[in-house]
Image (cartoon, grey):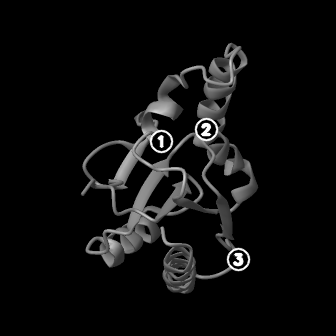
């Protein structure tokens, strides 16, 4: 498991706090608007749940510009997806749902366009205390995970 305390997050483009695996059904994506204690609480709570991965992206705007630059040069529908964004998202199958947890989750929508994963939003409310926000985040992840698993079972995933 990655550590939020082991390095300076401002220098890291992609940080797999809970790495993706073949069992991943839900990938939580957080950005710099999520306080480190909130991301740590998610990592601690879901560290033993192989269906959940956690990806922290400290500078999504920079990475979006980079990904857009790479994708502009793709001329074929079967062209190889390149760049840091594509390499970092490669461990996730197309069936994995991305739960974007941010104060502005719509700014992370482009992540679903890299390989075509479905995108879900949850907004980090900066007007609530941190403990309530963490509790809400964990409850939201559980609710979404339940629905994802039910849907996958129903469709035979």
Measure the C-alpha gap from mark 3 to mark 2: 32 Å
Residue at 57%, 77% in the rendered image: 151
* Frontmost residue, 43 versus 99: 99
Q: Which mark is residue 89?
A: 1
**For mark 3, what is the residue?**
127
Measure the C-alpha gap from mark 1 to mark 3: 31 Å
Residue 63: give x, y in percent of width and height: 59, 32
Residue at 29%, 54% in the rendered image: 5
Measure the C-alpha gap from mark 1 to mark 2: 8 Å
Q: Which image quarter holds the N terminus? A: bottom left
Residue at 51%, 32% in the rendered image: 86
Q: Residue 120 lies in what quarter of the image?
A: bottom right
Q: Earlier in the sequence, mark 3 or mark 2?
A: 2
Q: Which mark is residue 114?
A: 2
At label 2, counting other C-alpha atoms closer than 10 Å, the crowd grade (few under 14, some 14-19, many 20 or more) is some
Q: Earlier in the sequence, mark 1 or mark 2?
A: 1
Q: Is residue 136 above or below residue 7?
A: below
């Amino acid at each position: 498991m990655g550590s939020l305390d082991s390095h300076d997050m401002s220098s890291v483009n992609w940080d797999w706090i809970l790495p993706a695996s073949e069992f991943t059904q839900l990938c939580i994506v957080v950005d710099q608007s999520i306080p480190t204690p909130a991301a740590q609480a998610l990592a601690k709570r879901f560290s033993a749940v192989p269906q959940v991965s956690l990806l922290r992206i400290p500078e999504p705007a920079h990475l979006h510009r980079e990904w857009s630059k790479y994708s502009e040069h793709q001329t074929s529908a079967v062209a190889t997806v390149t760049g840091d964004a594509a390499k970092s998202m490669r461990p996730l199958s197309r069936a994995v749902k991305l739960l974007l947890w941010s104060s502005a989750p719509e700014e992370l929508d482009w992540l679903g366009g890299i390989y075509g994963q479905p995108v879900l939003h949850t907004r980090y409310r900066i007007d609530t205390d941190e403990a309530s926000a963490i509790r809400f985040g964990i409850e939201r992840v559980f609710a979404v995970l339940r629905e994802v698993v039910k849907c996958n079972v129903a469709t035979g995933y």
